[in-house]
Image: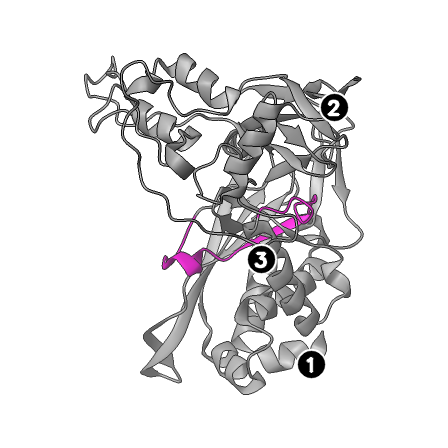
Amino acid sequence: MSRQTFTLPDLGEGLTEAQLIRWLVGPGEPVAVDAPVAEVETAKATVEVPSPFAGTVAELHGAEGATIAVGEPLISIDSGPAEPATAAYREEERAGSGNVLIGYGTRERQGRRRRRVSRPAPAAAPGERPRVVSPVVRKLAKDKGIDLTALRGTGPDGLITRADIERAAAPTPGGTGGTDQRTGLGIAERIPLRGLRAAIAATLSRSRREIPEATTWVDVDATPLVRLRSELGERPGLLALVARFVVAGLGRYPVLNSTVDTESGEILVFDGVHLGIATQAGHGLVVPVVRDAHRRTARDLDAEIRRVTAAAREGSAAVLTPGSFTLNNYGAFGVDGSAAIINHPEAAILGMGRIVERPWVVDGEVRPRHVTQLSLVFDHRVCDGGTAAGFLRFVADAIESPSSALADL
């Protein structure tokens, strides 16, 4: 029997470390080639790490919640046949109760699922050994101080699973979060600032610390844009049309499509636009990027915006590539305006509020119109207010006369 140690691989995009969210296997369990062994969170996404080796798990290098650097040992695997206890635990996995230890245990390699209805068994009688097969479940119970003989297993034939241990160890309502020393209030929850949330905090803090930003905004009559959108049918959407105007505006005011190189003391103006789309995903704010947006039509932009935002919400890091300018549709949250934070190291971010009917003066008469607010936050080092206002007014004029603007683009 030989032992092979798998180190944390390079997860791409220059990421150097990842936080170990949870193990999907435990010591003594069998593992196949390409089977996921751990779930980790990088600064961009949560991913499952597959094993390049087959055999039996010998050692897990790191506790859940720990940060592991790329190249450091992740898991050691012994080749050779599985031990009897391992085979028995594999049967527990395949029972499909949904309460097994490892996350992929109820999922066959072809993606099929099997269900089995199980009922809690009586607690072990005095002198009777508790129904536990997995050594990892035993270790988890020991670490949490849980008496296995007092538990009623919910797995097949009363088997005690990880879920049973976690339920037994869960704190009661009004748990022990401690007391805040400054206010004297109890702490209801402690949220670790790590992984993607830590990356977001670091980027935004650096942006506010390094960039002397300024904000300018304007209310826009979007009625013609809404009308054009209706005439065009389902595609392209409003966001794609605005994105097309933004790209055109950056062509007129290219200094906003730049970054400041503090080491060389230069403003680097980009030749082309990688357009970021601020997106709220389940795990936090992310900015998937439409690459080469300057080469795309409104319909191309629409398709690519839908693709990259959907991928980002599903946790894909492949679309979270570096951008040159960001568009933020915070109107999707039902708000009118926002002084956004620039996505460092970019030079500007354009936000768009919700489109709502408001009274608006047209040809000397007050009429109901579809109105939105645009706000531009820009790095004052790259330009002054006149340039920023010129760009913002260009986009606003295009929204108010979209047919003629598209004809000219």
Residue 48 vertical placement versus 245 (above, below): above
Foreground disc of the pair 3, 1: 3
Residue 268 position in % (x across, y down): 76, 41
Highlighted magenta segment, given as a residue range: 315-338
Residue 188, image quadrant: top left
Magenta stretch encompasses residue 334: yes
Foreground disc of the pair 1, 2: 2
Residue 299 vertical placement versus 107 (above, below): below
Of the numbered discs 3 and 2, the one sitting upstream in the chain is 2
| Mark 3 vs 1: CB contact within 8 A | no
Q: Which amino acid does label 1 sit on?
A: Ala
Whole-number angstrom distance, CA of label 1 to CA of label 2 = 57 Å
Residue 144 position in % (x across, y down): 38, 16
Structural crowding at the residue carrying mark 3, measured as other residues with C-alpha within 10 Å and reported as few (<14), some (14–19) or many (≥20): some
Magenta stretch encompasses residue 313: no
* Horizontal side of residue 248 vs 103, given as left or right: right
Of the numbered discs 3 and 1, the one sitting upstream in the chain is 3
| Residue occupying the point 52% across, 75% down | 400
Residue identifier under label 3 = 310
SS for dot 3: helix
